[in-house]
Image (cartoon, rainbow, N blue to C red):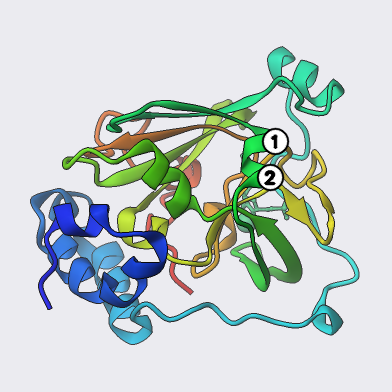
Amino acid sequence: MIVSRRELIGLGAAGAGGLLLGGCDRLNDSAAFRGVLGGATGLNMRTHRLLMGDSLAREFTEADLSPVFKANGSLSVADPAYRGHLAQGFGGWALQVGGLVRRPLALPLSALKSWPQRTQITRHDCVEGWSAIGKWQGPQLGRVLEAAGLLPNANYVVFHCADVLEGAPYYESIDLVDAFHPQTILAWRMNDAPLSEAHGAPIRLRVERQLGYKQAKYVMRIELRESLAGLYGGGGGHWEDSRGYQWYAGI
Ligand SMILES: Nc1nc2c(c(=O)[nH]1)N[C@H]1C(S)=C(S)[C@@H](COP(=O)(O)O)O[C@H]1N2
Ligand SMILES: [Mo]
């Protein structure tokens, strides 16, 4: 089935699930995708999606939860504005959603908590050689994007984080196929407790079919973009820019 980008964007998060393969083929054909996804990364993404389709990442049970979930990368944030919000339990904080959207949003944490929630127990795989199983809860990213209303030329969702790691602001990005996947959530709760600072308070991305470095912590602002060119190093993420990690980190 061929689904136009306009139709894909117009679909609800639930309705989009079954149609994403068609939408995915269509997205892969677009010039924007060819630009970023040449070479090995593009091959990895196309192969992974061919094998995975719109399937779910494996989910586990409470009995499988790791007794210790290592925190990695930034464990705290130096930014004074962030520290002020942290001290006040993020009561006056709001997630900014902007860029190529019809309605820019400022969503308080209370709003993100009151939307329909998804809970999932999944395995996190870090390229540094460790894995851990954790329980995550939050609204689906797709719901947030629907509320903002994507413009037709929006191809990528960028997550701007509060921390600076090794001298560069942390950021990450995904495409609309992963953005509207049912297991892609903005988690504010981990293992039945609000996110700690080390694990990314107040919210972090969970994009369960990709590696650990895509799971952006301390997400302050979400930006819809047509292309990743011209944003920091142009690689679409902190480690993609600094170490050459693959932008599409499918597992
Ligand atoms: N903002 C931000 N997000 C981040 C990182 C980071 O340093 N800063 N590290 C990444 C890496 S490499 C991993 S493995 C996971 C670690 O998440 P955790 O600290 O909850 O284990 O977060 C990812 N997201
Ligand atoms: Mo990682």
Name the residue nearer the viewer: 82 or 92: 92
- Judged from the image, the secondary structure of the residue bearing numbered disc 1 is helix
Q: Is residue 152 left or right of residue 72?
A: left
Which mark, by number, is residue 110? Answer: 1
Q: Identity of the amino acid at label 1?
A: Ser
Nearer to us in this view, 178 or 3: 3
Ligand 2 falls in which quarter?
Answer: bottom right
Report which quarter residue 245 is drawn in: bottom left
Residue placed most toward the observer, 169 or 7: 7
Q: Is residue 236 visible?
A: no
Residue depicted at 23% across the width and 59% down the height:
8
Where residue 127 appears, x then y in whole percent? 59, 64
CA neighbours of label 1 inside 10 A, class few (<14), some (14 to 19), many (20+): few
- 111 shown above or below 210: above
The residue under the point 15% across, 48% down is 32
Quarter holding residue 231: top left
Judged left or right of residue 132, residue 145 is left
Q: Which mark is residue 113?
A: 2
- Quadrant (top left, top right, bottom left, bottom right) of the N terminus: bottom left
The answer to whether 119 appears left or right of 100 in the picture is: right
Q: CA distance from mark 1 to mark 2?
A: 5 Å
Disc 1 + disc 2, Cβ < 8 Å: yes
Q: Residue at x 68, y 45 (%)?
A: 113
Residue at 88%, 65% (x, y): give it: 68
**Which element carries disc 2, helix, strand or loop?**
helix
Q: Is residue 94 above or below residue 68?
A: above
Please tell me whether residue 211 is drawn above or below residue 133 in the rendered image: above
Q: Where in the figure is residue 14, as x and y percent of width and height?
A: 41, 67
Query: Camera-side residue: 172 or 62?
Result: 62
Q: How many marks?
A: 2
| Image spot of residue 56 (x, y percent) | 49, 78
